[in-house]
Amino acid sequence: MHFLSIGTILLSFGIYASAVDNSTILSPKIDTFINNVLAEWNTAGGVAVAVVRMDAQGGWLVETKGYGVAKADGTKVTQDTIFALGSDSKLFDILATGLLVSNQSLTPQISWKTKLASIMPGWKLMDPVASSESTIMDLMSHRTGLPRHDYSYFVYNDTFPALIHRLKYLKPSAGFRQIFQYNNMMYAVLSYLPTVLLPHKPPFVRYVKEHILDSLGLNSTTYSHATATATGRMADGFARTGINQTANPLDAGIPRVLPYLFDFAGGDGNTFSGPGGVLTTAVDAMLLLNGQHPTTNATIIPPGVVQMVATGVTVPEGNACVIPIPQRMFLSITLMQRFVRALCHCLWRGADPVVLPRSWCVLMLGAFVRNPIRL
Ligand SMILES: *[C@@H]1O[C@H](CO)[C@@H](O)[C@H](O)[C@H]1NC(C)=O
Ligand SMILES: *[C@@H]1O[C@H](CO)[C@@H](O)[C@H](O)[C@H]1NC(C)=O
Ligand SMILES: *[C@@H]1O[C@H](CO)[C@@H](O)[C@H](O)[C@H]1NC(C)=O
Ligand SMILES: *[C@@H]1O[C@H](CO)[C@@H](O)[C@H](O)[C@H]1NC(C)=O
Ligand SMILES: *[C@@H]1O[C@H](CO)[C@@H](O)[C@H](O)[C@H]1NC(C)=O
Ligand SMILES: *[C@@H]1O[C@H](CO)[C@@H](O)[C@H](O)[C@H]1NC(C)=O
């Protein structure tokens, strides 16, 4: 779901280099490149970038920086500006699912291949095969045969049982596991797993806070817009009005601040939290690293879970990516993809070649001006 005019991208690359180059990636040259893209796109917003590299000793080289404007009052983006992740929140949804999969104390234990029919009360789909055979991995991979059906999903005071009850009335538009079809409701279903499976029935948001955010020290990350706004660091989402889409979709137009879509979610979140509710900063996103605590090295998210959620399962349109990105963590909005591709090409082919180490990530959080019609 392309919820908002803002988004995040985390890409990880596996590039071999004989030595780790410690030189800065977010150099003045890259700063100029990013500022030029913001200017060319006439954006009223900005972007935060985190670059994470592993050094030869297995430690981390981290750079975080902000570019452009965070708020209508002219506040600049910094590494601590809070952005709405929109659909990239789905990463946290499946990391949480992975924690349940690796929880040895769960009875019965579950796996990525556990069928929804065996664990989710009220689970039923119209297609009997998809209904009985759909696994956690099928929901994560958008291959149940259901198209988006977002008009059945944007029910603001929805409950999980009500949402699950509706699924059986929604027509599939493809066979089970036939094609990739993006579906938010399935990520809402996944976010109900902690409540359904654990004896103390924690709401999804509380589960993520306890086992991921607090454990890793992602102290600026929240699902609550009120909490984020209270810090004074929450970025505005912008739209542009008064432009001719056909003539120039990137025309400056008149910037307009959009109200936050999920303002009502509150501390414990709701059915939108899993598919789209994360609010976070470049610094926090950088702290995700590979699921280890940044200072104690304690394993918070098991490596197998990180590996699994970073592995592509369905390949839309037979074309996983334009640039060589072996592990694409998650989808993002088109313009952001173009921006990241452009940035990667710039890093790739730069006149001052950066020696890319074995393992690094570029993370971008952005508030770009987009026409709300395409949300
Ligand atoms: C990078 O920094 C590490 C220590 O932080 C040092 O051991 C290593 O030699 C440096 N590598 C290069 C290529 O400068
Ligand atoms: C964590 O791992 C890094 C890299 O291997 C190491 O330099 C550091 O000493 C470790 N920290 C602790 C507390 O074990
Ligand atoms: C693991 O399962 C046990 C038993 O159901 C539960 O008490 C605990 O909170 C769970 N932990 C996680 C991280 O899921
Ligand atoms: C949800 O909101 C609608 C419109 O405000 C209202 O008619 C309906 O009764 C509400 N449903 C629940 C379950 O609260
Ligand atoms: C997050 O907050 C905890 C508790 O206040 C603190 O111990 C930790 O250092 C903070 N982490 C970061 C990365 O600031
Ligand atoms: C928008 O631009 C197109 C192409 O330049 C033009 O044909 C069209 O008339 C314009 N629409 C409006 C409403 O100005």
Image: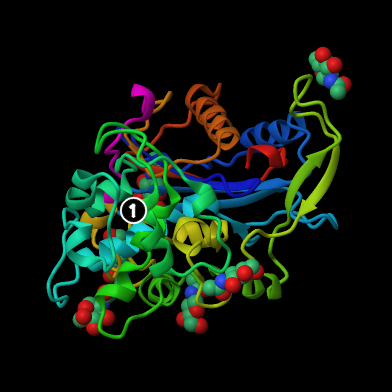
Residue 73, compared with residue 270, is above or below; it is: above
Residue 339, compared with residue 8, is above or below; it is: above
Q: Secondary structure at mark 1?
A: helix
Can the viewer see residue 55 in this picture? yes
Residue, x 38% and y 51% (percent of image)? 169
Residue toward you, 327 or 313: 313
Residue, x 27% and y 38% (percent of image)? 313
Check disc 1 and give the amino acid type.
Lys
Q: Does the beta carbon of the residue at mark 1 sit less than 8 Å from ligand 4?
A: no
Residue 70 counted in the magenta span: no
Residue, x 70% and y 42% (percent of image)? 372
Q: Is residue 343 left or right of residue 100?
A: right
Residue toward you, 366 or 90: 90
Assign ligand 4 to one image quadrant.
bottom right
- Measured as percent of width and height from the top left, residue 151 is found at 54, 49
Q: Residues within 10 Å of mark 1 (few under 14, many from 20)?
A: some
- Measured as percent of width and height from the top left, residue 314 is found at 29, 35
Residue toward you, 326 or 84: 84
Residue toward you, 375 or 369: 375
Quarter assignment of residue 162: bottom left
- Measured as percent of width and height from the top left, residue 229 is found at 69, 70
**Mark 1, residue position:** 168
Q: Is residue 66 left or right of residue 351?
A: right
- Specify start and end residues of the magenta stretch as a single range: 308-320
